[in-house]
Amino acid sequence: MGMRGTAGPSRVALVGIAPFRPPCQLPMASPTLRTLARSLGLSHATISAALNQTGRVKAETAERVRRAAAEAGYRANPLTSAVMSGVRQSRASTFRGIMAAVEIAEFNRPADAVRYHAELAAGATERAASLGFRLEQFLAGPNHVPMRRLAAILRARGIQGIVLLPAWNEPDLSELDWSHFAGVYADYALGRPALPSVYPDHYRGMMMTLEHLRSLGYRRPGLFIAQQQDERIQHRWEAAFLAFDANRDGVHRAIPRLKTSGPDRAEFIRWFQRHRPDVVLGHTTDAIAWMEEAGAVVPDQHGFVCLNLLRARVPCAGLNLQPRLVGSLAVEQLVAQLHRHEIAGLSRLAPSISVPPAWVDGPTVRPAVRTDLAPLAFEEPSLLDRLSSAI
């Protein structure tokens, strides 16, 4: 019997099996107070009171509500309680919430730091108002509101956003429960907790200032600064001063910085007569009189620059650290956190924004570059000059 040839490969039909299609995965809606109320058979008001711990709900009911909210992944809107609290106090249609500007009470804060805080708070208040928020100020620390008590006060007021004003000493905010708040520090970064920060860019300000003084013809800048002042900003003034000098024309002949525990007339005059800077950069304007006492002629032959014009007691050239802008940007960062539902106690990231200082002309520097100056490189005083200045 002969074999039948095959016309081609056999085909098997699968009957009753539909082709695979991945299921349509729609995003699950976030649980709300109303969905929690329906699932638990309770009223919306009861759910809200239980989660806000107002004390108007039985303890066992409040615990059941909180447990169900945690299991459902419910997260409160950080703006809701603030808005509702504000609406009860204000009928303005643009009102969106309340923020706190928290200042730590410190006995050794200098007067210029008080003025800086006032300017910063003014900028923050103005920007908050323009965004529909009211900024309320709180003073915390010794002989004022304790940190542990502050958290309860803020929550009772419906406040969940904090702008922390700069502290003169390194602050420890570990006693403040940050698990319910968004926060921004208006100074250099904190470690406890790690908050986003906004601060003046001292390093950039020094670089900009030295470059401008160079364009005016100054060749021997000298830095006069308090030790604590430099340490507080992590030596940024000094670091920029040294970096600028080390990379200018390949010459590194810096005048030694004068770092003191406080203004010291006798020490300053000795330093000035020995090293002969043609322009001094510092914070205290008392140095202008000390320079003239040591033989300087300001501004014809010598200059003085105030590194923070809020500290100037007489008209002079210097830097505006722009505290109002720092405060304004801090509020903007805080509003962004609230809209993103970010909580400071849960965040691992602490981004920072630096604000460059603004140069302000004044009568203590020459107004224009002169053409009869010494060469650009620093010139060391001669041995004879050193000996004569020491007599």
Image (cartoon, rainbow, N blue to C red):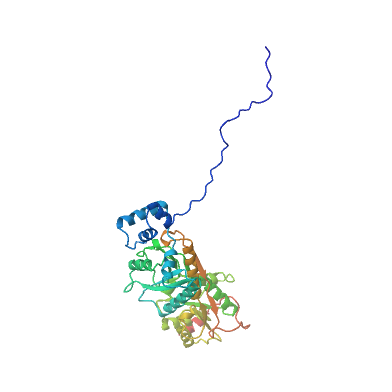
Give percent across and percent down for residue 254: 52, 74
* 169 shown above or below 271: above
35 or 359, nearer to the observer: 35
Give percent across and percent down for residue 175: 34, 64
Q: Which residue is most to the top?
A: 1
Residue 237 seen in the current view: no
275 or 82, nearer to the observer: 82
Quadrant in the picture for the C terminus: bottom left
Quadrant in the picture for the N terminus: top right
How many callouts does the rendering have?
Answer: 0
Give percent across and percent down for residue 184: 45, 67
Give percent across and percent down for residue 222: 50, 78
Q: Quadrant of residue 145?
A: bottom left
Q: Is residue 144 left or right of residue 80?
A: left
* Residue drawn where x is 56% and y is 38% of the image: 20
293 or 99, nearer to the observer: 99
* 186 shown above or below 278: above
* 11 shown above or below 59: above
Residue 63 seen in the current view: yes
Q: Which residue is most to the left?
A: 59
Q: Is residue 177 left or right of residue 303?
A: left
* Residue drawn where x is 48% and y is 63% of the image: 339
